Image (tube, rainbow, N blue to C red):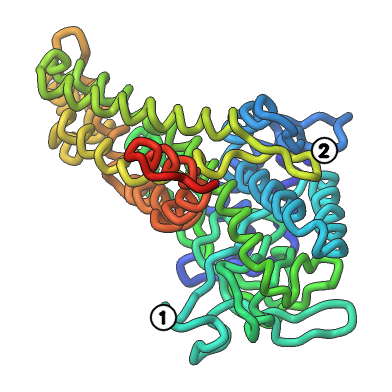
Amino acid sequence: MKTGEQYLASLDDGRKVWFEGELVERIADHPILGQSAKLIAEGYDKVYDPTGDHSPFADVPTDAQGLREHIEFVHDMGMLAHVTYTSIMTLLTAAGRIMSACPEEVERINAFVEYARAEDLRITQCITDAKGHRKVRPGQQEDPDSYVRVVERRDGGVVVRGAKLHITAASLGHELMVIPTKGMKPGEEDYAIACMIPVNAPGVKIVDVSYAPRNADAGTFPVSGPVSYPESFVILEDVFVPTERVFLDGQVKYATVFAHSLGLWERLGGLSSMADGADLLVGLAQLIAQANGTESVAHVRDKIDDMIIHATLVRASLEAAITHCHVGDNGAAFPDELYTNAGKYHAASNYDMLVQHLHDIAGGSIVTAPSLADLRNPEIGPAVRKYMQANPEIDGETRLRLFHVIRDLTADTYGGWRLVTNIQAGGGLYAQKIVTRKWYPMESAVAKAKELVGVPFAP
């Protein structure tokens, strides 16, 4: 197992990372990326055991209770640990689904998972391609590099080229899990590539952006300040991948297996995050209503009731997905597809309702309230404190802090990031509709309808 210090040292491996137009010399020293790296280091230290042979978050759940405990555990460890866990489970889920057809590839997957666990590595997920013209198939693009592809097959491996977008914290991990973003057809064998690439491999270039606040006053960004991670644009310029790291090469029939496996785990992660997030928004709505003195106003109570019902249904979907989990041939438990996708769709498509209600309850001070630095100023601070108070039982500073939390969480840069990622994580909303329909027991529903109207039902 690695310590946080060893993790930070592992980033000095020659990786090529750019941030706002400049090559980053040393990630740990960077004013923005360094703070994210330190968050990850804290996660390493949180579970470090000098006698352990692997991090406990990398254990594979085999039943519903183990699945439930792991969700809570990896959330507590931070974003990159969560992404690593879902990457491992993606590989094992895919391996279980191609076990009979691709035995050699499954052996490589299992060997890599054991290696990643033994070395206490962090993995990020590279799935979304540049895609080029959206109406054109991968193999028919004007620029063939619009989707990651194999450009050369050599003895001992393949050479890949292309780019992957929207990759959370790619620059801060150790390995890039590169998988197809969609199904491939005959003639598109070069695009049916799944493999694992070290971040510091020759030809890998990463461009980072970040929603991290640039304000030194932590109180102004109480939510995003402590939890910011970069989003990465990963460029693969003729990167050689050894055969032992190739998990799919040309088998177009199985290209979707990896994407669907990742989608399942990403959507479970999104569902669990939004269940916690919905409860938080309900709590903030109740607190700011109390601070405003409006908690007993009918329309405020009605809005909070709407939020409570939404939060409860999201939580119920998560519990159903876990309780009705399935165990694959390799012994790994994975969540139920129907409840995971329907729950994620419901949570994401109604998230704006939660935020709208919270903003309506809180009021315009979400974006116009003075800063905490103003509150500390001896000349204007007392007036800020006085006029920020509404309910005599809740002081002005508490109400001011509530406004800043709500703004940072829902109405500033980080809030915009959450709004987009809630929709896009694990694929857009339509993808969840497609999978929900696929797994819904339609025949049973139709049979019940036919029985009610008296139409004979042929089994």
Q: Is residue 373 visible?
A: no
Residue kind at label 1, given as amino acid type:
Lys
Q: Quadrant of residue 64?
A: top right
Q: Quadrant of the N terminus?
A: top right
**Position in image of residue 192 (x %, y %):** 67, 74
Q: Quadrant of residue 12?
A: bottom right
In this rendering, would 385 be left or right of 75? left
**Position in image of residue 125 (x %, y %):** 61, 58
What residue is at 47 percent from the left and 57 percent from the top? 427
Q: Is residue 413 visible?
A: yes
For marks 1 and 2, give the CA distance.
Answer: 45 Å
Residue sitting nearer the eye, 169 or 385: 169
**Mark sitting on residue 54:** 2
Q: Is residue 147 above or below residue 316?
A: below
Residue sitting nearer the eye, 341 or 90: 341
What residue is at 80 percent from the left and 56 percent from the top? 99
